[in-house]
Amino acid sequence: MALPYSKKVIEHFKNPRNVGEIDDADATAMEGSPACGDMLKLSLKVDEKTHKIVDIKFESFGCASNIATASVLTEMVKGKTIEQADKVTWKQAADELDGLPPVKMHCAVLAIDALKSAIDQWKEKHGLAEKEPTTPNKVLRKLRNVLNPLTGASIVRMQLLQDFDVRDGVVTIDLDLTPDHKFASHIEEEIHEKLDHLWDIKEVKISFVGSPDS
């Protein structure tokens, strides 16, 4: 049986707004995983003086609701300040679409999670985030959406962080992947993107320690 989508959901699915990627984005966030369903990537361009979101784009890898909620959310927050956008809720995004089927409500949550991750990243880069010390648990949170492209699964969920530590401003990470892994440089770059800008981190050291037979 077809899901009871509203006219707005169908409209945003067929004609999504603000699709794409901002090459010189001030913040980029990805939430979800292709291994378990929907995935969404958001990129922001923010005016440093006014804190206004002057541009926002998304790339969706998921269902009609995923695309529709991302599309409507970009319309809702474009032109707002970072502080205003940070207050938008998943329920407001769903209501803007005249509702979502209950089984698809997680798409609105996913869109908001991506937005808040991007906002947090921008705040951290500009010294506006609460200066929470970087702990091993914070490292895990930051890396939860770094994926191994070969499997589409999170390096955290797949327990590829064989060993990691945070000490004196230095993060050391041992990854259970071989140095010649096809996407080693890509994964390493994403880890640096997630951690390098944190206020109390001086250096991020990454080692690929997996054996060829593992």
Image (spheres, grey):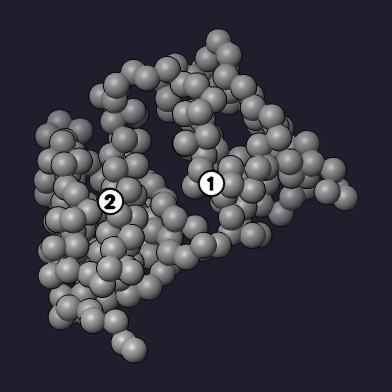
Residue 150 placement: quadrant: bottom right
Badge 1 marks a residue whose secondary structure is: loop
- The reply to whether residue 58 is in sight is no
The number of numbered badges drawn on the structure is 2
Task: State whether residue 122 is above or below residue 45.
Answer: above
Location of mark 2 (residue): 112
Q: Is residue 160 found left or right of 193 in the rendered image?
A: right
Q: In the image, residue 119 lies at what x, y percent?
A: 28, 39
| Label 2 neighbour load within 10 Å: few <14, some 14-19, many 20+ | many
Residue 44 located left or right of residue 199: left
**CA distance for labels 2 and 1:** 18 Å
Q: Secondary structure at mark 2?
A: helix
Image position of 194 (left or right of 44): right
Percent position of residue 95, x then y: 13, 63
Q: Is residue 83 visible?
A: yes
Of 15 and 113, nearer the camera is 113
Outermost residue to the top? 168
- Residue with the most extreme bottom position: 1
Q: Badge 1: few (under 14), some or many (20 or more) residues near its Cα, within 10 Å?
A: many
In the displayed structure, 183 sits above or below 46; it is: below
Foreground mark, 2 or 1?
2
Q: Amino acid at mark 1?
A: Val
Which amino acid lies under the numbered mark 2 shown in the image of this protein?
Ile
Which residue: 12% across, 41% down? 84
User: Which residue shows up at 13% across the image and 70% down it?
Assistant: 98
Q: Is residue 133 left or right of residue 179?
A: left
Residue behind mark 1: 146
